[in-house]
Amino acid sequence: MHQERLLKEIRKKIGNKSLNDEISNILNISYDAAHRRTSSKAKFSFEEALELAKYYQISLNQFITSDQQIVVQKTSAVTQTEDLQSFFQNNLSIFENLPLADGMTIYYSAKDIPFFYTLSDTLLSRFKIYVWMNLLNAKQVFIPFLQFSAPHFETNTKELKKKYEEQNVVELWNDMTVSSILQQILFYYETGLLQKNEAKIILDELKELIEYIEQKTESNLKFRLYENELMHLSNDIFFHHQKQSLFAIPTNMFGYILINDAKTCSETLNYFEHQIKNSKSLNTSGNRDRKIFFNKMYQQIEIVNQKL
């Protein structure tokens, strides 16, 4: 029964292509051996079934009988700056394996400013990596920012940022979204690890980023921003598509649990839609409400600027 269900899912993925040819090529077996498996005269081995499920991005959750159990993936741990290369490459792989060009929508619950926006060659981006690595790796705590050297992965980060910016994106923000980066700037400045001139530049770049988000909210039809004042945001990312969705739950700054179980993704979509119903659209609410929202963030930036 499970083999028939797996084959049915593969047929959905390949459309009019030859099922036997596909199985033969992926498993590196003969056409006749593939035919025996597709006609149920022979069974897939466990390794073969896993290989097919992995290749076609088929969730194994549907083959588990209990609604209380699902199969998830976990991104590799990041404990030092060198690990960031694989983290960004893994994120690119996630995008490449999703049907982006055919009705994909990305939902982002922005407890912090979405990390996609800080993937650039700026002091702000370098500072964010510095903070992340200090929090993740005890060996790098309390080295001055001036001495911190971020690894070079500009190609991956530029491509990742570009892919995110090209999608239909729905972001949920609130007054606290900008607070964490401001608290980090103030903390490292007060401990003497961040110099005043560096902090000033980072604040200027942060203001420019917020101005860019404001401009996107006014003019980019593929970008929707909501102010959610009622619920705690979580940095969850949900890639929604009718054929294939993916839910990414953060475990730390650079770690995610990845879930593509259909039932869980359907529940996640309902949850995001419920949050949106209780949020204010900053695209359609008018200039006054939009200015009030963004001015709150500019004021928070200025307050920190005055403290330096």
Image (cartoon, grey):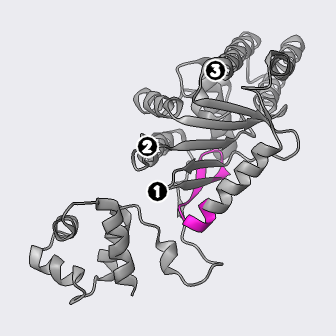
Q: Nearer the viewer, mark 3 or mark 1?
A: 1
Give the percent coordinates (x, y) of residue 195. Answer: 74, 15
Tell me whether the residue at label 2 lies in contact with that at label 1, contact meaning CB atoms closer than 8 angstroms: yes
Q: Earlier in the sequence, mark 3 or mark 1?
A: 3
Q: Is mark 2 on a helix, strand or loop?
A: loop
Residue at image location 25% in from the left, 87% down from the top: 40
**Which residue is tagged 2?**
102
Would you say residue 264 sits in the magenta stretch? yes
User: In the figure, is residue 122 to the left or right of 41?
Assistant: right
Assess disc 3: are there few (<14), some (14-19) or many (≥20) residues with their C-alpha within 10 Å of its C-alpha: some
Residue 19: x and y in percent read: 22, 69
| Cα–Cα span, label 3 and label 1 | 28 Å
The spot of residue 181 in percent (x, y) is 75, 29
Q: Is residue 272 visible?
A: yes
Residue at (73% x, 15% y) in the render? 207
How crowded is the residue under tag 1: few (<14 C-alpha within 10 Å), some, or many (20+)? few
Query: Residue 216 — which label?
Result: 3
Which residues fall within the magenta stretch? 249-265
Pointer 2 or 3: first along the chain: 2
Q: Which amino acid does label 1 sit on?
A: Lys
Q: Do the residues labelled 2 and 3 touch (CB within 8 Å)?
A: no
Residue at which label 1 appears: 243
Q: In which quarter of the image is residue 259?
A: bottom right
Relative placement, left or right, of 26 versus 160 is left
Image point (23%, 60%), residue name = 16
Where 218 sits versus 47, above or below?
above
Work out whether residue 30 can be spotted: no
Q: Nearer the viewer, residue 202 or 227?
A: 227
